[in-house]
Amino acid sequence: MNGVIGKPRNIFLVWLVWPLITLGVYYFAWYYKVNREARDFDRRIEVSPGWAALSQILGWILIIPPFISVYRCGKRIAQMQRAAGVPSTCNSWVGLILYFFFGLHALYYQHELNHVWDRYNQPEGTTVALHI
């Protein structure tokens, strides 16, 4: 089985700088991209990046869906780590707890996701064999 490499990102730019510059809009774009990269990396991961991002955008109205989505995003990253053959260190509960502290889950999840991309040391968009 093959997957497509995503983009390694600077964790502090993802968590603090770009969201501040864009007044928070970048976070939703980042969340969409992370979920799309999960789907593209491992076809066994079932996720609709649009619905995942929408759960974050409408979270202030719906309350529960953003928490479920953040938890599941952590599960997807852990599954990606296993598929890449790196230790599965991403913990969904840690991500969910960090969600409540200045959105630190974005920093944590991007850090964990970068482990996957670093394992291959290939440019974004490269097709690689997955560890099954």
Image: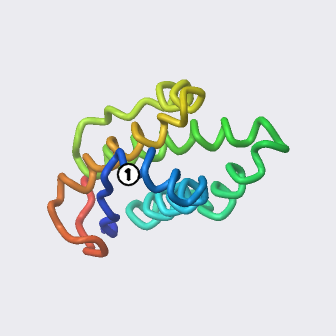
- Is residue 1 visible from the viewing direction of this image? no
Q: Secondary structure at mark 1?
A: helix
Picture residue at 84% right of the left edge, 44% below the top: 61
* Horizontal side, residue 9 vs residue 74: left or right: left
Quadrant that contains the N terminus: bottom left
* Residue placed under numbered mark 1 in the picture: 13
Snapshot quadrant of residue 91: top left
Picture residue at 33% right of the left edge, 41% below the top: 112
Q: Relative to 48, does residue 80 appear above or below in the rendering?
A: above
* Frontmost residue, 91 versus 96: 96
The colour scheme is: rainbow
Picture residue at 79% right of the left edge, 42% below the top: 60
* Frontmost residue, 26 versus 90: 26
- Is residue 51 visible from the viewing direction of this image? yes
* Horizontal side, residue 47 vs residue 77: left or right: right
Residue 6: give x, y in percent of width and height. Answer: 34, 64
* Frontmost residue, 6 versus 128: 6
Q: Relative to 5, does residue 21 appear above or below in the rendering?
A: above
* Frontmost residue, 117 versus 47: 117
Label 1: few (<14), some or many (≥20) within 10 Å?
few
- Residue found at the very far right of the displayed protein: 61
Q: Relative to 20, does residue 124 appear above or below in the rendering?
A: below
Residue 102: give x, y in percent of width and height. Answer: 54, 32
Number of numbered discs overlaid on the protein picture: 1
Picture residue at 23% right of the left edge, 65% below the top: 129
- Residue found at the very far left of the displayed protein: 121
Residue 130: give x, y in percent of width and height. Answer: 27, 59
Q: Mark 1 is on which residue type?
A: Leu
Residue 48: give x, y in percent of width and height. Answer: 62, 62
